[in-house]
Amino acid sequence: MYVIDRSSNWRRKAVEDTIWGLDLISPALREHVITAWVTTWTASPYEKLEDMPWSAGADYPLIAHVNEVTKAGVDLAKRSSADWGITLDNDLLLPILILHDVDKPMMYERKDGEVVQTTLAKEIPHGVVG
């Protein structure tokens, strides 16, 4: 299904440059999060991060969705802190937000101009790989 890709390559750099919030987590954890994204990307049919769709029937960029969710989560965490005095550790919160759809590059593909489920998506539910 996939092989963990820890190599230092152009994909790793692209993930670092594209995914919002990586700079808010510790360096060691950031490397693990980047490795997870590079691993699923390498196992996917996509040449570029920007080519990955968010869902079947919705040709919206996955990375745009992930960045929007991450920013919204950080904003909500700030509200939680201001309103209720509850502070969330970025090393706990950010990986959850950034990795919530990490399996989608392997779950959706483009066929005949449409975004459809891959064979893998029909075998295991979304979230298992992540």
Image: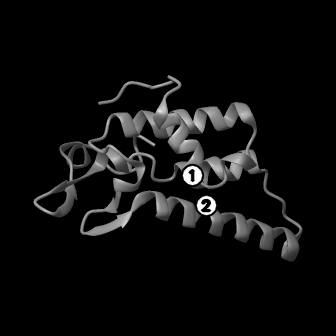
One can see residue 7 in this view: yes
Question: In the shown orientation, is residue 52 left or right of residue 13?
Answer: left
Residue found at x 63% / y 69%: 72
2 or 18: nearer the eye?
A: 18
36 or 111: nearer the eye?
A: 111
One can see residue 52 in this view: no
Where does label 1 land, which residue?
19
27 or 47: nearer the eye?
A: 47
Disc 1 versus disc 2: distance between alpha carbons? 9 Å
**What colour scheme does the image use?**
one colour
Location of residue 9 with respect to 40 vertically, above or below: above
Where does label 2 land, which residue?
70
Question: In the shown orientation, is residue 1 left or right of residue 41?
Answer: left
Give percent across and percent down for residue 69: 56, 65
Residue found at x 71% / y 70%: 76
- Image quarter where the N terminus lies is top left
Q: Contact (CB < 8 A) between labels 1 and 2?
A: yes
Residue type (three-letter) at the residue carrying disc 2: Thr
Give percent across and percent down for residue 99: 53, 48
Residue 85: quadrant of the picture: bottom right
Location of residue 6 with respect to 60 vertically, above or below: above
Give percent across and percent down for residue 111: 14, 56
How many labels, in total? 2
Residue type (three-letter) at the residue carrying disc 1: Ile
